[in-house]
Amino acid sequence: MSDYSTYFVAGPENILSDHLLGNENKEQALVRIVKELAVNGLNVFQLRAKNLDENNIITLLKDLNYAMNGTNTKLCINDNVNVASKVGEIIDILHLGQSDMHPDKARSVIDHKIEIGLSITNENQIDDIPDCVKYIGVGPIYKTNSKNDASKPLGENCLKNIILKTNIPVVAIGGIATSKVSKLFDLGVSGVAVISNILNNKNYLQNFLLLKNQIYKD
């Protein structure tokens, strides 16, 4: 099973102009940034590219896989079962939302080595987690501006209840500031998933190392 401690979610749409070097486009900048974080110990990178067509997503995944070669970072694709079925040899994780294909069905069409993660947006959903799901992404925990269709924040108490009621790893997501990371791990999460925490300014590597330090400071 993967280590989900540091879990970075992004797509080209999350890249700011400040992140671009020279004549880079946003896809090239994303690949460079993920490579740099991977070299510095990132555990999981999830590509969430809502504005790209399937062929461009596959090309970007191949570029990311090449850039991450030699690191221990796992490559995850968000939602897209069809893409995962076509390039399963370079994908480590498929992450599904509540409105996506049912995990059991997805399991039947993707490579057996690919782990499946599932988003949980309320406590009742933990009663219907299939055995094929290896971890759950729970959130948003706090208010977030990174996802336009995000649900109402669950809060720390609900997160704790979910952790107590499940025996698989829980990754917290949504509005997670670096100052909250230690507390979330004290509550029992196996990882924190972040977007804006890393990419909210040009200092993405410094932001990541600060996050990582909060996890491993003990």
Image: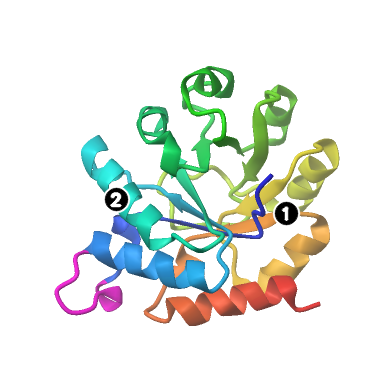
- Left or right position of 6 against 27: right
Q: Give the x, y percent position of residue 12.
A: 30, 57
The correct choice, above or below, for 65 with respect to 54 in the image is below
The correct choice, above or below, for 157 with respect to 121 in the image is below
The correct choice, above or below, for 180 with respect to 174 in the image is below
**Which colouring convention does the figure follow?**
rainbow
Instruction: Inspect the image, locate mark 1, and give the three-letter code of the amino acid beneath it.
Output: Ser
- Left or right position of 198 against 218: left
Spatial CA span between label 1 and label 2: 28 Å
Front one among 64 and 133: 64
Residue at the disc numbered 2: 60
Q: Which of marks 1 and 2 is in front?
A: 2
Task: Give the residue at x 54% y 21%.
Answer: 102
Residue at the disc numbered 1: 190
Quarter of the figure with residue 56:
top left
Q: Give the x, y percent position of residue 22.
A: 17, 79
Task: Give the residue at x 67% y 36%.
Answer: 134
Quarter of the figure with residue 3:
bottom right
The correct choice, above or below, for 77 with respect to 27 in the image is above
| Within-10-Å neighbours for mark 2: few <14, some 14–19, many 20+ | many
- Name the quadrant of the N terminus: top right
Residue furthest toward the right?
164
Span highlighted in magenta in the image = 17-25
Residue 58 is inside the magenta segment:
no
Task: Give the residue at x 47% y 27%.
Answer: 100
- Name the quadrant of the C terminus: bottom right
SS majority, magenta: loop
- Left or right position of 42 against 109: right
Considering the numbered disc 2 on the image, is that residue within a helix, a strand or a loop? helix
Considering the numbered disc 1 on the image, is that residue within a helix, a strand or a loop? loop
Instruction: Inspect the image, locate mark 2, and give the three-letter code of the amino acid beneath it.
Output: Leu
Front one among 197 and 82: 82
